[in-house]
Amino acid sequence: MLATTCSDVVATMTRKGVSSLEDFEWTKQLRYYWDTDIDNCVVRQTNTRFVYGYEYLGNSERLVITPLTDQCYMTLTGALHLKFGGAPAGPAGTGKTETTKDLAKALAMQCIVFNCRCVCRRCAMSALLAAAAMPRHQLPPVRSRCACSDGLDYKMMGRFFSGLAQAGAWSCFGESCCIFSCTVVVTLCAAWGHSS
């Protein structure tokens, strides 16, 4: 798949007459260079530069690179270059998590997926509506919290963020509607040494 993508990229650059290293069609590609100044491999895209992570993540398949994948990569690398995170948004099942994981793999960075299946009030209500034919006494209770987030408190989240920072790893929070904003705020305040 990657060979097909590469030949498509070369064909597009040839068709558009790319002749300079500063042409956007070239700089928007994820490229690998050996930087002799730091004696290390760097990954570049647009105006960003990352030191290659050397995290071996197995020999699994990569995503098929599409124009949308390229745009996601450019957006995420631009945000990371500015010391921000990224939050790809869109409908379920469109590959947001997989794209983030694939970019992490391209940069050889460990990416921990923290996925919380949501059983919050909104989701429980839709499940209740789907089960409208059931007798009332058999309906499950509407929960105000996610079943898997009962153990999520600021201490657990603090340990999670601490481990990420110590390992230099990325995290991808999938279906994070279960993590209450107060838990995240208290965790970040504790991590930054502020009183809550």
Image (cartoon, grey):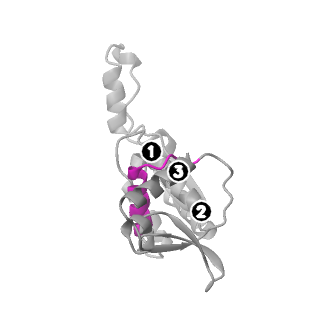
Disc 2 is placed on an element classified as loop
Where is residue 3 drawn, in percent x and y? 56, 50
Q: Quadrant of the N terminus?
A: top right
Give the overall secondary structure of the magenta segment: helix
Q: Give the range drawn in magenta.
A: 62-79
Where is residue 132 drawn, in percent x and y? 31, 18
Q: Provide the residue designation for mark 1.
A: 95
Can residue 183 be seen by looking at this rendering? no
Furthest-bottom residue in this view: 37
Q: What's the amino acid at mark 2? A: Met
Mark 1–mark 2 Cα distance, whole angstroms, equals: 19 Å
Q: Which mark is residue 114?
A: 3
What residue lies at 54% left-to-right and 51% top-to-bottom?
113
Q: What's the amino acid at mark 3? A: Phe
Decide: is 16 above or below 27: above
Which label's residue is closer to the chain start, 3 or 1?
1
Where is residue 130 drawn, in percent x and y? 34, 22
Where is residue 161 drawn, in percent x and y? 54, 63
Residue closer to the observer: 88 or 171: 88
What residue lies at 35% left-to-right and 19% top-to-bottom?
131
Decide: is 126 above or below 170: above
